């Protein structure tokens, strides 16, 4: 991946590995152990993520995940090399996944037999195109680093501006302080580039109750901070105007009662 995206993914991977394994990979982990990630042999680069894990069936193996922002023609050969090196070093089975984040449709070969015709090697890894995954499943998370990835999901014909607004509202609701919110929004701006949504994201940020300076290298808090309740109220109003979420869902996201959401809804109706 490009260095910009690679840095953010590596910053966040520890926070999201358990829910992502459950949601995207379809595996349910009980134990995760760190292992050395340098294979000490001549390989182009280190694996993005490797851990020794135990799943809910008490099976132990090495979990290997690569993130790709563009199609790589020789990916299947690279994954096969990684598997051989990991098996030699750890003497355990290896499960491998490539999570594709790019804008173009995923076209990487996942089987050696498809890459080298007539080869009887049955090597295969699992390719996951995050654009086919329902973004709302990621939006439901309570982990900011996972919510950010919702911008890469399947919007199901929902306008991108509304999706971005929901992501920002969700981040604002669960962030413990403005410094962390600032960090998450900066990361969202970078990830949004993978989907060419910089303009929509910038516009939605500018409409937030907290002002940000948007510069070429990121987003910086300018200092006009609204109270927590005002921010929460603005978040609820934005989600009500979107009209895509039930009152119960909005109450859950904003961490308020359904009664409070209904009262704000009535105020909006009265003022229209």
Image (spheres, rainbow, N blue to C red):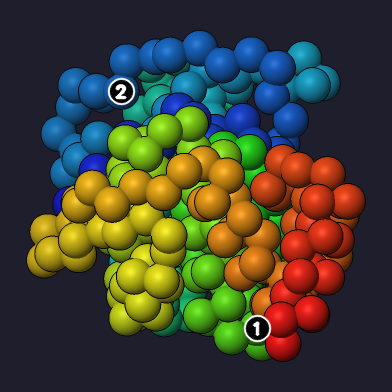
What residue is shown with label 2?
A: 37
Above or below residue 34? Residue 55 is: below
**Horizontal and vertical percent for residue 138?**
63, 53
Direction left: furthest residue: 216
Query: Horizontal placement of 71 versus 150: left or right?
Result: left
Dot 1 falls on a residue whose secondary structure is loop
Counting from the top left corner in percent of width and height, residue 35 is at 39, 14
Query: Considering only order in the chain, which callout, 2 or 1, is on the residue closer to the N terminus?
Result: 2
Q: Specify the quadrant that holds the N terminus.
A: bottom left
Between 265 and 20, the one nearer to me in the picture = 265
Whether the residues at callouts 1 and 2 have beta carbons within 8 Å, the answer is no
**In the picture shown, does residue 260 fall above or below 136?**
above
Which labelled disc corresponds to residue 103?
A: none
- State the image coordinates of residue 132 (x, y, percent, origin top left): 63, 71
Q: Residue at x 68, y 77 (%)?
A: 241
What's the residue at 43%, 14% (across, down)? 34
Q: Secondary structure at mark 2?
A: loop
Label 1 neighbourhood size at 10 Å, few (<14), some (14-19), many (20+)? few
Point 72% across, 87% down: residue:
272
Nearest the viewer among 30 and 217 is 217
Residue 220 sits above or below residue 116 on the image:
above
> Residue 130, percent across and down?
55, 63
Residue 158: which disc? Answer: 1
**Residue 116 placement: quadrant:** bottom left
Q: Is residue 263 visible?
A: yes
**In percent of the image, x 26 and y 58: which residue is there?**
212
Apparent side of residue 100 relative to residue 92 in the rendered image (left or right): left
Tell me the mark number nearer the camera, choosing from 1 and 2: 1
How far apart marks 1 and 2 lie (CA) works out to 40 Å
Vertical placement of residue 270 versus 194, above or below: below
Image check: 147 left or right of 26? left
């Amino acid at each position: 991946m490009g260095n910009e995206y690679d840095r953010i993914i590596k910053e966040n991977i520890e926070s999201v590995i358990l829910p992502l394994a459950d949601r995207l990979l379809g595996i349910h982990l009980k134990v995760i152990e760190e292992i050395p990630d340098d294979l000490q042999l001549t390989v182009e680069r280190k694996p993005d993520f490797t851990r020794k894990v135990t799943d809910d069936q008490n099976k132990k193996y090495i979990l290997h995940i690569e993130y790709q922002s563009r199609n790589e023609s020789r990916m299947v050969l690279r994954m096969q090399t990684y598997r051989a090196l990991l098996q030699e070093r750890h003497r355990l089975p290896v499960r491998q996944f490539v999570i594709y984040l790019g804008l173009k449709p995923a076209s990487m070969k996942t089987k050696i037999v498809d890459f080298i015709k007539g080869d009887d090697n049955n090597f295969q890894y699992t390719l996951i195109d995050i654009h086919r995954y329902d973004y709302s499943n990621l939006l439901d998370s309570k982990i900011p680093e996972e919510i950010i990835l919702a911008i890469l999901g399947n919007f199901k014909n929902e306008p991108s501006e509304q999706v971005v607004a929901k992501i920002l509202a969700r981040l604002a609701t669960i962030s413990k302080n403005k410094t962390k919110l600032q960090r998450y929004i900066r990361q969202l701006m970078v990830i949004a580039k993978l989907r060419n949504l910089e303009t929509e994201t910038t516009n939605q940020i500018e409409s937030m109750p907290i002002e940000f300076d948007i510069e070429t290298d990121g987003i910086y808090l300018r200092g006009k901070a609204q109270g927590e309740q005002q921010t929460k109220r603005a978040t609820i109003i934005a989600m009500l105007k979107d009209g895509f979420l039930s009152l119960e869902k909005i109450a859950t996201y904003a961490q308020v009662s359904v009664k409070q959401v209904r009262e704000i809804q009535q105020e909006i109706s009265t003022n229209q």
